[in-house]
Image (cartoon, helix red, strand yellow):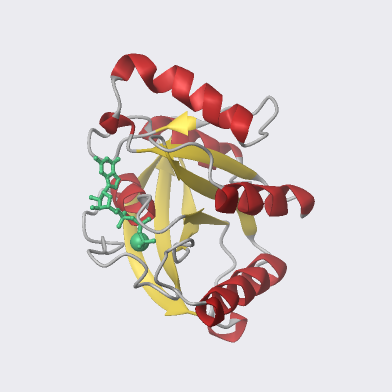
Amino acid sequence: MIRIVESFYVKSAVEPNDYPASAYAEFAFAGRSNVGKSSLINILTNKHLLAKISRHPGKTRTLNFFLIRWKDDEKEQQGFMQFTDFPGYGFAEIGLAEQEKWRIMIDKYLNMRQQLKGILVLVDIRHPADPKDKTMIEMLRLRNIEHCVIATKADKIPKTKVQATALKLAKQLNLGDKSIIPTSSEKNTGIDNVIAWIESHLK
Ligand SMILES: Nc1nc2c(ncn2[C@@H]2O[C@H](COP(=O)(O)OP(=O)(O)OP(=O)(O)O)[C@@H](O)[C@H]2O)c(=O)[nH]1
Ligand SMILES: [Mg+2]
């Protein structure tokens, strides 16, 4: 399996002209505001301040790009990839005009970003499937964009309920035979499964 050895914040951008020019395989993290996107990026990269964990949900309004160096010790391979942290959606205090800006920014990104290999859609394991998440996943399906769903904050429910809750969520989100990966950025669980999904979509 690959492991992440180094990571750097590259830049923030809204318009395609401002995206980093590099052509490395890219993965984006999407989900409602406060679901734990930045925390997951921090855990994946072992850098606790790489993607700032916001105390003010809904503050990030740009796409944030990170450069990641990975290594596969067994295969003696190494390379680069990029992560993109999307601004969260569904934050109650954002007005309609702001929501429309978000929609246009994401639409452009999905249309223009040629090296995009997949989207990781994060949902909170404590809540029933959210209409905004359903819309996001449906849109990715319609556009044939590879995606996986991650249920965050698994430490917030009893361990014995994690698998059943993930299954229930997968059903509510119409994921078919795809499964949800439960994670906890607090307890560092499920992270290897996320890396494995990324690795399987890297090429
Ligand atoms: N208990 C627990 N808390 C978590 C976990 N992941 C994130 N959090 C907390 O949830 C809050 C939001 O986390 P962020 O990573 O900033 O969420 P985000 O999705 O990046 O939010 P936006 O950038 O506003 O869209 C923070 O207080 C985190 O500490 C987790 O796995 N377990
Ligand atoms: Mg964030």
- Would residue 169 be visible to someone looking at this image? yes
- Would residue 195 be visible to someone looking at this image? no
Query: At which x and y percent is residue 2?
Result: 44, 38
Query: At which x and y percent is residue 173?
Result: 62, 37
- Outermost residue, top side: 160
Q: Nearer the viewer, residue 94 or 115?
A: 94
The residue at 53%/31% (across/down) is 169
Q: Is residue 127 above or below residue 79?
A: above
Residue 17 quadrant: bottom right
Q: Is residue 84 above or below residue 48?
A: below
Query: At which x and y percent is residue 160?
Result: 34, 14
Q: How many marks?
A: 0
Looking at the rendering, the quadrant in which ligand 2 lies is: bottom left
Q: Nearer the viewer, residue 70 or 60?
A: 60
* Residue 129 as seen in the image, left or right of residue 71: right
Q: Quadrant of the N terminus?
A: top left
The residue at 55%/71% (across/down) is 22
Q: Is residue 186 above or below residue 39?
A: above
The residue at 38%/50% (across/down) is 35
Residue 179 quadrant: top right
Q: Nearer the viewer, residue 5 or 148?
A: 148
Query: At which x and y percent is residue 95?
Result: 48, 77
* Residue 177 as seen in the image, left or right of residue 79: right
* Residue 46 as seen in the image, left or right of residue 182: left
